[in-house]
Structures are given as structure tokens and as C-alpha cells.
Image: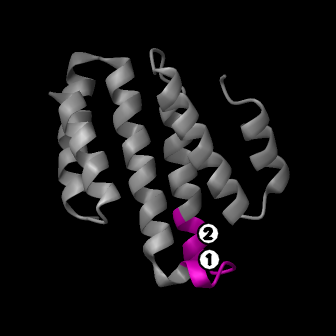
């Protein structure tokens, strides 16, 4: 059930919906945490990081890259993605997706060296 909820949230995020995925992700995290299913927790957190990145990019703040609010949104997305990647059992494609989102955030924050390191150390 938690995997289904996370996939649904991911589809909603990709459609540009920013409110419904929150409810669905809360449900996925609640189920995953109550059953102690690490890969499902990590996957749900990856989707939450994706949502936070999408919100940052959709905000008008991204046009002002030096805006403290935009930087804060990106940092929160990065923190969520980093936490997600600590969970054991994530599939390689999920790890790669998380690292690519982290690299994108690093580029948006003008952290080119960090982005380059993330890309070169990505799983193959």
C-alpha cells in the first residue's frame, strides 16, 4: 500500500499537482514507518524531496536565485533527499534518481563541484 501511495504521489507531482501529493505521501510514510519497511520509507522520502524541489522550481522565487526563501526551499529538498538515500534496500534507479535531484539542487545553488562529484560517483 505504501509503494502504491508513493507511486501515486510521484505521478501527481509530475502532473504539477502540489497539494494532493502531500496527503498521499503522509499516508505512505505513516504505513512504512509503522511497519519498519526501510526501502519504502526511503522511496517515500525521495518523492517528498522531489515534491519540495518541484515547489521550489515552481515558485516565482527561482527567478531570483539569490532569494533567501528560494535557497531555503532548495536546502530543505536537499536535506530530505539526503535522508532518503540513507535507507538500506533502495533500488539502484531510486538511488540514481535521488542523486540526480541532489546534483540539480547543487547546480541551482551554484555548487558546481558538489554536483560534479554526485554525478561522477553515481551508481552504474
Residue 124 inside the magenta-drawn segment = no
Distance (Cα) linking label 1 and label 2:
5 Å
Density class for disc 1 (Cα within 10 Å; few <14, some 14-19, many ≥20) is: few
Please tell me which residue lies in front, 11 or 111: 11
Tag 2 residue: 71
| Callout 1–callout 2 Cβ contact below 8 Å | yes
Residue 118 vertical placement versus 23 (above, below): above
Question: Residue sitting at 71 percent across and 64 percent down?
Answer: 109
Q: Main secondary structure of the magenta part?
A: helix
Give the side of residue 104 with respect to residue 24, left or right. Answer: right
Query: Is 102 in front, or is 7?
Result: 7
x and y percentages locating residue 78 in the rendered image: 57, 50
Provide residue 21's location: percent of width, then percent of height. 24, 54
Residue indicated by mark 1 = 68
Q: Which residue is nearer to you in this view: 34 or 52?
A: 52
Q: Against 83, is 24 above or below?
A: below
Residue 100, percent across and down?
61, 44
The residue range painted magenta reads 62-73
Left or right placement of residue 29 versus residue 87 in this view: left
Disc tally is 2
Determine which quarter of the picture holds residue 22: bottom left
Amino acid at each position: 500500500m505504501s509503494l502504491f501511495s508513493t507511486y501515486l504521489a510521484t505521478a501527481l507531482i509530475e502532473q504539477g499537482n502540489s497539494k494532493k501529493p502531500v496527503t498521499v505521501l503522509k499516508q505512505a510514510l505513516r504505513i512504512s514507518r509503522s511497519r519498519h519497511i526501510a526501502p519504502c520509507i526511503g522511496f517515500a522520502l525521495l518523492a517528498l524531496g522531489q515534491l519540495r524541489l518541484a515547489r521550489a522550481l515552481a515558485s516565482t522565487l527561482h527567478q531570483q536565485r539569490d532569494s533567501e526563501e528560494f535557497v531555503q526551499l532548495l536546502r530543505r529538498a536537499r536535506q530530505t533527499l539526503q535522508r532518503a538515500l540513507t535507507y538500506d534496500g533502495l533500488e539502484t534507479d531510486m538511488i540514481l534518481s535521488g542523486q540526480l535531484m541532489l546534483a540539480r539542487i547543487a547546480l541551482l545553488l551554484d555548487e558546481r563541484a558538489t554536483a560534479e562529484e554526485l554525478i561522477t560517483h553515481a551508481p552504474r
